[in-house]
Image (tube, coloured by chain):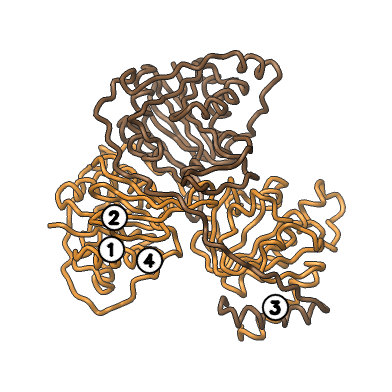
Amino acid sequence: MSAIFVWIETADGAARPTSWEALGAANGLATGLSLPVVAVVFGKGAAAVGQQAVARGASKALVSEDASLETYRLEPYAALLTALVKEHAPRAVVAVATSAGRELLAASAADTDSAMLSDAIELGVDGGAVTAVRPVYAGKVLSDAAADGAAFVTVRGRAFQAAAESGGAGEVVTVSPVLAEGDVKVKVESFEAEVGTVNLGDAAIIVSAGRGIANNPKEAPAGTEKADVWKAQDGFETVIKPLADVLGGAVGASRAAVDAGYIGYAHQVGQTGKNVAPDLYIAVAISGAIQHQAGMRNSKVIVAINKDGDAPIFKLARYGIVGDVYKILPALTAELKKRLGK
Amino acid sequence: MHIVTFTRSTPDTAAKVEVGADGAVTWGGAATVVNPWDEYSLEEAILQAGKAGGKSAVIAVGAAMHDDALKHALAMGLDEAYRIEDPALDATDSLSYATAAAAAVNKLGDAKLVVFGKESVDVGSDSHIVQTARKLGWTMLSYVSKILEVDYAAGTIKVERLVEGGKQVVSAALPAVISVMKDINEPRYPSFMGIRKAAKAVIPVWSLADLGVSGLVGKARVVRFKNLPAKNVELEMLTGEPEEVAAKLVDKLLSEKVL
């Protein structure tokens, strides 16, 4: 059997929504190569998720809900994916370029000595070879790459249309894990969830703040050791987060804000943080250092709000506002609540 | 024992990178820097070698331009540097990179821990890191933000990883390849003495034959590089009192259909 494999990532028993983008990309490749799509789903809820994949265009789903696969771990997941690839010899294996997707596909590509094309923003077929367009050199240049033989491809989140429900039917087949729990050398000891934040990589809207968020008119309580940190943290809580919440968006930050201790590293957008490309990126009190631009310049619409009209961020922006972010943001949040009926 | 790390020279972040008339990627006369994520892995290799009482070794896969990154690493305090270059080796193919990298780690012979920066910005990928671990048959721990324990005698490692939605503590068996995030340490600056020593260093170059690798065939190839499509963003400044600009902006965003 030759087919296009797509790995559907699950979290807490449900498909990660961006995984349907991988299925959309796989459906596109399958049309180009006249091959069926086979969804591969591991972990809690895999059978139900496999059923959903079939309803969205896959002709079949290979699933395993074995306890050793309950939550994602590279070792047992890669062992099973590699075994399935060896058994079924797919022409391509597609997944979304999440942290798990990237390492799982790279591992299985290595195990099977296959081509790895990561972070694709476009896919195609040329003379039977799977091709991909990938951003390289920190997104400053694009590369057209081609795979010889089977292609393992990760697709950048939000670059492909999610596969829609098409009412399709197909079989869901249970497969057995390769590694027994006793063979798995990696044990997850604990997980500390970050509460109440939308994942930056999945977010359609991001509201980011820079060092200027410390220009909070409120006074830090007497005796506060670092007044700027208090002011900035208060700013994230009282003006940035409410705006992100009303927009259903995620909170980002510049490296300067992270290094100053204003917010955690998980929020950093830019060269040594996350690369994002949301529909809307609102840069608040961010000057726009080149390192920050590297992580957000491919956003669809960029709005810059800054007290300094000469800040470099305005060169990337579609809309700019010069003024006090502590006056403008609350007004913007109130206006959005009114207009969006929230 | 060796703690091994890998690095590359990449164009300076501020450099204008484009595809020239000959189809090659160029950044004019701009300098290269150490791949930004590698500042942290180089520092971590020095720290871990110090704790283990071993030597730190840094390896680059590719042409002579990567000697600059290796010399920066030596100036920071890495003990040894090596470069792998061979006409049959295309380092943009992650599988080829990983095959050579794994062979180099094996050549050093006594490594138990390999440290990479999270990704390489020039190839825009981290695939080669995971694949190096697979080619070695070692444990892969990616996105490590903290090394909590390493016990070489017991053959165990415990780390904190940054994953989607939170932080995970995992324990695993050595030997291991890890990729590290920015918040793992504060990279040191090269010292004056380090820079002088590095300037004089002669970096050994290994061919694939030196590594015992034969018949290496790349699987992913770059067909061409191309410039980004021109993006003409016209900036529109919105002015007025806070309430006015807020209303104007919401109008604009609704008409852009991004809300």
Task: Say whether mark 1 and mark 4 are on the same chain.
Answer: yes
Q: In terms of depth relative to the viewer, which is nearer, B98 or A8?
A: B98
Residue, disc 1: A29
Task: Say whether mark 4 and mark 2 are on the same chain.
Answer: yes
Residue, disc 2: A130
Chain for numbered disc 4: A
A303 relative position to B168: left or right = right
Three-letter residue code for mark 1? Leu
Count of labels in the image? 4
Q: Colour of chain A?
A: orange
In the image, residue A188 lies at what x, y percent?
Answer: 40, 44
Residue, disc 3: B249
A5 relative position to A274: left or right = left
Give the alpha-carbon distance from disc 4 to disc 3, as whole Å: 30 Å
In the image, residue A145 lies at what x, y percent?
Answer: 37, 50
Give the alpha-carbon distance from disc 4 to disc 1, as whole Å: 12 Å
Image chain in brown: B
Q: Does the CB distance between marks 1 and 2 fall below 8 Å?
A: yes
From the viewer's perspective, is the residue at label 3 or at label 2 nearer?
A: 2
Task: Pick the quarter of the image with the C terminus of chain A.
Answer: bottom right
